[in-house]
Image: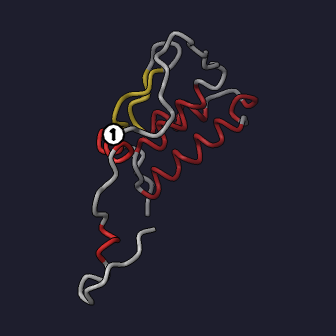
Amino acid sequence: MTPDWSRKFDEPIPLPKGRQLVTLKDARTYITKLPKAEHMTAEWQAAMEALILVATLGGPTMFARIGIMRALNRHVERVFNPDRKDHHWGRRKLARDRLRAVAPLRFPWYAWRGKKEGKRAPLR
């Protein structure tokens, strides 16, 4: 399959100096014009690999976009914000579950397994 470098990204990728990468070809030329030391970093190598796979195999352009964005932002450190809303990491508590804990079923489904024979199965 021949590479299709004319495909456009879903959204243009903004570059640090105000330019944008619109197509796969724009991204290819940007990466090839990087300085050799920056070009050989692991992030840019992964971005190039994703870009080539998208161009040759026709995968989603989002894969190449993610690779390029990660390479562009490799020096940006994510800062923890303690003011954000806390997450509830426990199990969801539904009203249905509260009712079962307070008043369990009087006739659980497993109590009537032997109904056809006329005898009840023992409760567990």
Residue 16 x %, y %: 53, 15
Task: Name the residue tied to disc 1.
Answer: 94
Residue 97 x %, y %: 35, 44
| Residue for point 41% across, 75% down | 122
Q: Check disc 1 and give the amino acid type.
A: Leu
Compared with 25, 21 (above or below) is: above
Apparent side of residue 42 relative to residue 91 in the rendered image (left or right): right
Apparent side of residue 43 relative to residue 122 in the rendered image (left or right): right
| Residue for point 66% across, 41% down | 45
Foreground pick, 103 / 77: 103
Identify the residue at the far front of this view. 119
| Residue for point 58% across, 26% down | 72
Q: Secondary structure at mark 1?
A: loop
Compared with 7, 19 (above or below) is: above
Compared with 111, 17 (above or below) is: above
Q: Quadrant of the N terminus?
A: bottom left
Apparent side of residue 57 relative to residue 100 in the rendered image (left or right): right
Q: In which quarter of the view is residue 3 placed?
A: bottom left
| Residue for point 28% across, 63% down | 107
Residue 31 x %, y %: 58, 33
Q: Residues within 10 Å of mark 1 (few under 14, many from 20)?
A: few
Foreground pick, 97 / 29: 97
